[in-house]
Image: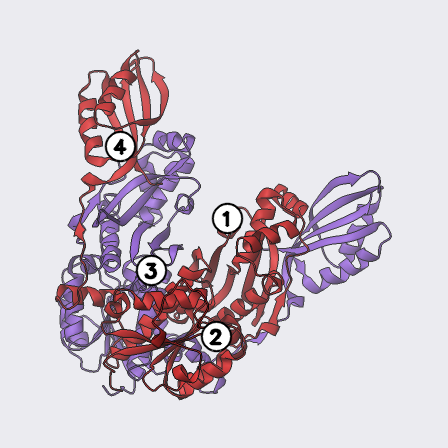
Chain colours: A purple, B red
Amino acid sequence: MAIPPEINVGLLGLGVVGGGVATGLLQDGAVSRQVGHPVTLKKVLVRDPGKPRDTKLGPELVTTEPQEVLSDPDVHVVAELIGGVQPTLGFLKQALSSGKHVVTANKEVMAKHGLELLTLARQNRVSLLFEASVGGGIPIVSCLSNQLAANEVRSIRSIINGTTNYILTQMAYQSTPFPDALRQAQELGYAEADPTNDIEGFDAAYKIGILASMAFRRPVSPEEVYRQGISGLEPQDFLYAQELGYAIKPLAIAGLEDGGVCARVYPALVPFGQVLAKVDGAYNAVEVEGSLCGKILFHGMGAGREPTTSAVIGNLIEIGRSMVSPSGIGSSGGLDTLVDAEAGKQPWATPGIRPIDGLMSSYYLRLNVADQPGVLALIAQILGQGQISIASVLQKGADQSAQTAELVIITHPSREDSVRKSILKIADLTVVKRVNNLLRIEV
Amino acid sequence: MAIPPEINVGLLGLGVVGGGVATGLLQDGAVSRQVGHPVTLKKVLVRDPGKPRDTKLGPELVTTEPQEVLSDPDVHVVAELIGGVQPTLGFLKQALSSGKHVVTANKEVMAKHGLELLTLARQNRVSLLFEASVGGGIPIVSCLSNQLAANEVRSIRSIINGTTNYILTQMAYQSTPFPDALRQAQELGYAEADPTNDIEGFDAAYKIGILASMAFRRPVSPEEVYRQGISGLEPQDFLYAQELGYAIKPLAIAGLEDGGVCARVYPALVPFGQVLAKVDGAYNAVEVEGSLCGKILFHGMGAGREPTTSAVIGNLIEIGRSMVSPSGIGSSGGLDTLVDAEAGKQPWATPGIRPIDGLMSSYYLRLNVADQPGVLALIAQILGQGQISIASVLQKGADQSAQTAELVIITHPSREDSVRKSILKIADLTVVKRVNNLLRIEV
């Protein structure tokens, strides 16, 4: 297939995520640089062109007629950001059938019709990518498909619905009753006016169905996922669970049990020692256990405009790279752009190297000092001259025989070179026997 | 490029990782199924063919002559698992120059000569993939290159040397002095006889250099990474840090500071509230902060035969897929194999669906019961009849006016269907006012 002079992207939908993707495509050519070829936003399907939006598009880019995207032979890639099955399924089928690559963030349509759509993609020799359908900005779909492909997957344990995780976190830490926690989530925009999809586990069932289908190479439909919602939980459940050593978390799990796939969504008790017990608020996490890789955990923001945009544009870049790369070459990805940068081919703004001297950090300083009055004052004076202020001090374990004590000083953020200079002066003090350690503090 | 009837892989090295990769390639066609095309182990370069090994290879597969791999036109992909720069760099250059795709696990050669090798790959229109060079089984290299490509990376904070993390974990939890902790790590095979490479931060500097080069599209050489080793730490540093609310962790960091890349490797204090503070033992973790995705954390086993094999074979599968896929189609990855499975094209053993009835789990049961003697005995009797044994019981908050109490029961692992049947019987007891909740416990 000849490489078009520009890769034209058509968007279906200009909502929260669609707006983010449109903005990303219009921004300073970053996507084109990553692909190594011009990528252009060609047309955006909207329902109401008069609606006020954050994303300002020229009127020539906007249409209310689906065929202006789907039937335009110059649109090479369609990104579907409408959601739901109707009318989206028909749009996706038409796009694939007419030889367009497709990126979608639509978990419901992938969970219910994924195999059908992927088969259509295969028949038409185009790509269908759907990273954003599960886990927002967390690249779990691609990793399961590709990087972890050497593994027999044993289990997937995840928190992939941020709404219910937010609600359960409120119930756990604030003892908020369920109806109040739900209302808070709605006020913050985490939950929809009709929250059924989240709190009854449908959303998580779509997502774990998609992950299970990939991991176990067997279509797992949403009806095959066991669901229990969270509305039956009360604050005392969290108190009792805590007393027994557990957090209560909204889990989505798929595993091989006796040779069959068992997929399920429910609130469950998780021992405090496990990482999943510490995934709070609107965060998502997915733990994959594979035959070779062991347990790998992915943790990040699972929803929202920007993380989802990250996943959608990541897929668009992947398709763009495959379109411009000769057959047989797997992308070396970001480092290909590095080769471009070195070759002067791409106008990357290449940053310089900053030596550590200019680093701003808090520091931990441990000194052996004479056990006598006035020592701290001497040290504090030197630090003060270097514009280094002290956050806290511990005096420790005086050694009676040697008449020395240990002094631990934590500084406020200071410049590395200034700290080093001051340490040299401090080491020269006769009351300072030894500078034991100087460590940085990462906050 | 025509697709060869078999994709032939040549291995350089049959050590810990080489043995794992050879075993994976010889095993029951799993790699071929993932690629959708036969993938064959053609030849393995070893230094001493007489050395006893776990991995049994026919003598026709083994050679001590590099050119039997590098000059064989039937070898399409070379996987380099020797390590170090000499003689490896020459092998890699020859492989790329003669049009072979290359997979390497070699952090040192990629850190020191990555750009040169990638340029050579580009000139010869072949792939060079190196997922296993950083983070073992954690797919951080590919994610930075591809899935996160829509982001401007702001920082990478990581624990990517398992040896030093193991040593610092021992020092923190057991107050083990450094020399003893190092000796333990050597006895367990985590540290080498000459541990300099790990404890002085060279290994981590190679790895963060590779990640920083990708993230900031600027070659960051190992010499440009600031290093501080861990041998100066003493057990009391961990005690004082703990008192102040910090863990001490062997960090490798790269960030944009004032428009320049500052990359550094040192032990640092990390507040207990941060996930990195909880990454213990030989585990690795990498946190990427991107302009869109926010903070994403990857956590898993960063070294060892099997995780590294997972990464190397994952790269081999990626190259294989790109070799058999027509130009312009990005792989839909694992779901492509699903399409195959449905079409009856691939002999996958497709698992069935297991309903939740057969699940073995511990359960949390909360009941409202009459506040009178003998209630627990009645309930325990029903559970016992269902082969469900009780792990612990909490009795809570008697309601004086209603004369009821709350009973929380945790069971040992039991079958879901049996638990449900028993709950129905328990709900029928006149002393049981209400079954408030039944939740599963994920251990």
* Residue designated by label 1: B278
> Which mark's residue is nearer the viewer, 3 or 2?
2
Say which residue appears at 43% left-offset and 60% top-offset. Answer: B294
Chain ID of residue with mark 3:
A
Res B344 → quadrant:
bottom left
Q: Quick check: A235 above or below B26?
A: above
* Residue designated by label 2: B47
* Residue designated by label 4: B438
- The answer to which of B412 and B366 lies nearer the viewer is B412
> Which mark's residue is nearer the viewer, 2 or 4?
2
> Which mark's residue is nearer the viewer, 2 or 1?
2
- The answer to which of B264 and B302 lies nearer the viewer is B302
Res B297 → quadrant:
bottom left
Q: What residue type is labelled 4?
A: Leu
* Mark pair 3, 4: CA separation: 30 Å
Q: Position of residue B67 (x, y in %)?
A: 42, 85
Q: How crowded is mark 4: few (under 14 residues within 10 Å), some or many (20 or more)?
A: many
Q: What residue type is labelled 2?
A: Arg
Q: Choose the circle earlier in sequence order: 4 or 1.
A: 1
User: Does mark 4 fall on the same chain as mark 2?
Assistant: yes
Mark number displayed over residue A140: 3
* Mark pair 3, 2: CA separation: 39 Å
